[in-house]
Amino acid sequence: MTLPANETELTPEWLTQTMRESGALERGRVAKARTTRIAEGEGLMARLFRVELDYENADRGAPRSLIAKLPMDVPQNRQVADFYRMYQRECDFYQHYADRSPVRVAKTYGIARGETSDFVLLLEDFGQYRIGDQVRGNRAEDAVKAIAALAGHHATFWGQAQDLPHLLDYSIPEFAAALDHTYRASVQPTIDAFPEYFTPALRELALAVSEKTTALLKAELDKPRTILHGDFRSDNLFYDLPDAPVAMIDWQIVGRGYGPFDVAYHLTQSVTPEVRREIERPALESYLQVLKQRGVNDLSFSDLWESYRFNALFALVYPVTVCGSLDLGNPRGRALGEMMITRSLSAITDLNAGEKLPR
């Protein structure tokens, strides 16, 4: 069947066939499907729809609602997503690694791919649970809880990811060139859009990173590889599930890397500066404790702290890319970009992370 390009093409017939192929629908068929756009302005790289389902002769356990994820329809954002192979990476994660991770992720009800980067993911609907809010900032206890869960995921693949297929290595030349191109094109527009947040020193540092993106990517290649989430921020976390304290969604930037990056990205952009200052050391201690409990013994707290400082600087590439190259036309999109850049710059200042820039 033809791959749906929009919500109107998520027909009962297409859903029935796709869910049967995945095993999510063992018998019966989808009789009606009602779609509603959700998270508009929150997800910048894909369209999300809640699909409410009525069945004929289906098992009682068939999902009554699910989330359909489709490519973004904003050309500027779609170009960035294709540049970084985001859709391929997320589909590969759900297909090959989701079941191996101890973290709670959405159940997969269907994965359909086109010949290019087009795709449709049918995922478990977490809408009844509490979601984090990056604009407001993750609560201190929620951030610590999420980082501890993340540590379990990292530990599972610690030192093994280099041998796992279907993963993109962040340091490959193609990725390095893409990051270099995107950051260079985005940094001055970001400074121009938010000049009030850039002191002369921070402006100089942000521009200096333009010459060092590849060096930043390769700086920790001697460290153990694990599967990074890559976009470990508040909007991608759900809390208070009956079977888990936290669940993680949106694996579009998944890849091989060194675990402390995910931690630094969350602490420097998903909580307020006040919360970060309060919890960063306890959160790192908790992260390290979980790693050790799961058999990872090659990391000291001092080394973790220095990697955290380094990755606080490296994580600047995210808000610069968001603010300088994506369409932030809706109010929440702009608020998200503003919170990311202000918190990132605050953390870089507090941690004196500029001294971690490769020379």
Image (tube, grey):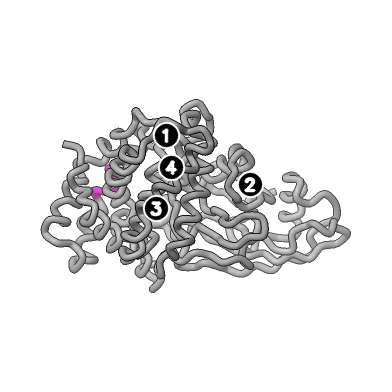
Name the residue rendered at 38%, 43% in the picture: 260
Viewport quadrant of the C terminus: top left
User: Percent position (x, y) of residue 206?
Assistant: 20, 52
Residue picked out by circle 2:
112
Determine the CA span between mark 1 and mark 2.
Answer: 24 Å
In front of the other: label 1 or label 2? Answer: 1
Residue at the right extreme of this rendering: 57
- Nearest to the observer: residue 264 or residue 25: 264
Q: Earlier in the sequence, mark 2 or mark 3?
A: 2
Could you tell me which secondary element the residue under label 1 belongs to?
A: loop
Identify the amino acid type marked 4.
Leu
Q: Is residue 124 left or right of 170 when viewed as pictured?
A: right
Could you tell me which secondary element the residue under label 3 belongs to?
A: helix
Name the residue rendered at 25%, 60% in the picture: 346
Task: Please tell me whether residue 171 is drawn above or below residue 124 in the rendered image.
Answer: above
Could you tell me which secondary element the residue under label 4 belongs to?
A: helix
Within 10 angstroms of label 3, few (less than 14), some, or many (20 or more) residues? Answer: few
Name the residue rendered at 56%, 61% in the picture: 239
Identify the amino acid type marked 1.
Asp
Residue picked out by circle 4:
288
Task: Please tell me whether residue 345 is drawn above or below residue 34 in the rendered image.
Answer: above
Look at the image and give the residue range highlighted in magenta: 180-184
Q: Earlier in the sequence, mark 1 or mark 3?
A: 1
Identify the amino acid type marked 2.
Ala
Queried whether the magenta region covers residue 183, the answer comes back as yes
Q: Which mark is residue 282?
A: 3
User: Percent position (x, y) of residue 100?
Assistant: 61, 38
